[in-house]
Amino acid sequence: MSTTSEREPFVEARFLDDFEKGSELLDAPFSRQALEEVINAHRELIDNAAIQIRATSTPGNPLSFRLFMTTPADTLQIAENQGWLHPDHPILGLARAVRNQCEGAIEQPEFTADKGCDALFMYLNGLRDLDFILATPGMPDAIKANRQKFLDVDLNELVVVHFEYSKELVSFYFVLQGPLSKAQLDKMVALTGAPPSSDNVYTDIVGVLLDSSYYLTVVMDYHTGHIARIELHLFFPVKLPPDMRIPSLGERLESFWDIPTYDPEDMDILSYCFGDTAKTGDILALRGYCGGFRDLIRSWGIIGA
């Protein structure tokens, strides 16, 4: 595994071919036209961006990717100008309010391989207190009402707010420190009303996590504040420790690892989902594709470097 920090640039033709072949491997929907529209709309940004690619263990789900920038750019306006988002979309207004609340926040837009514009991953330019984010003008009261639930499981520092447009979901990414006990995991899962995780799933999680830091995402309905699911994001270090146990991921995600990537340092993440019926048991696999994704995460100075 390489540990150099040379940056591999974005190559459009290669990216489109890799995504088309990767979609075939996973039997996932794909639209070259949708991806070309995304690339053309972000032409001035994409050459300097790091790209992260993602797949889920759920059959039929498309591949997706995020553009990670190191400096602020108004990608929300790009999405509006392209007609991907209506100016009155409620998520659009809240995303802009969070951006204004957090000086230096950086938008990292997210796209699916079949439809394009899908979501926004907003890095808050460092750790932010929960109360500071909840004080954002326009933050729905229904989301604010979850405050005590968060504090009861020691969720009080955020690094990212995520906005999913079509389903109108808002997610908070909290930073936590391992190791993780089964009781702690069960308390987190209980936020969603779902039953506790199985012992086997817990063993798989802690076999990767060990005593590292991790992100916990709490996904909420914009309108009702209902906590639809949680996601635990586990980061792989450059050099895997000898006691790390990588679980079996199934044929679909094993095929995802066969998609070529070009960063000199791997940046791999596994995410475990709990909550609504459609997501409980789902596993997400994420990788740095090009542009120096690990270097970008390292520059945040939080976790995952």
Image: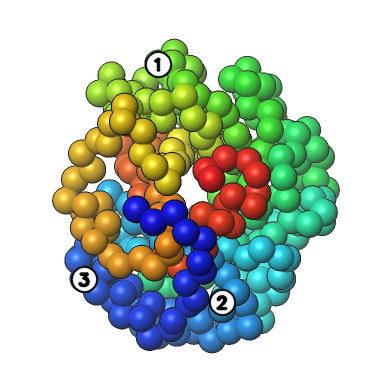
Of callouts 2 and 1, the N-terminal one: 2
Amino acid at circle 1: Lys
Residue at x-position 49% and y-position 30%: 212
Q: CA distance from mark 3 to mark 1?
A: 38 Å
Can residue 110 be seen here? The reply is no
Amino acid at circle 2: Ile
- Residue 200 falls in image quadrant: top left
Left-right relation of 297 to 192: right
- Residue 189 falls in image quadrant: top left
Of callouts 3 and 2, the N-terminal one: 3
Q: Residues within 10 Å of mark 2 (few under 14, many from 20)?
A: many
Mark 3 or mark 2, whichever is nearer to me: 2
Q: CA distance from mark 3 to mark 2?
A: 24 Å
Instruction: Name the mark on residue 46.
Output: 2
Amino acid at circle 3: Glu
As rendered, which of 131 and 181 lies closer to the eye? 181
Left-right relation of 283 to 103: left
Q: Where is mark 3, residue-wise?
A: 24
Q: Where is mark 1, residue-wise?
A: 182
Residue at x-position 39% and y-position 68%: 262
Mark 2 or mark 1, whichever is nearer to me: 2
Instruction: Give the percent coordinates (x, y) of residue 293.
Output: 51, 59
Marks 2 and 1 in Cβ contact (< 8 Å): no
Left-right relation of 274 to 245: right
Instruction: Name the outermost residue toward the left.
Output: 251
Residue at x-position 16% and y-position 51%: 251
Give the SS element for disc 1: helix
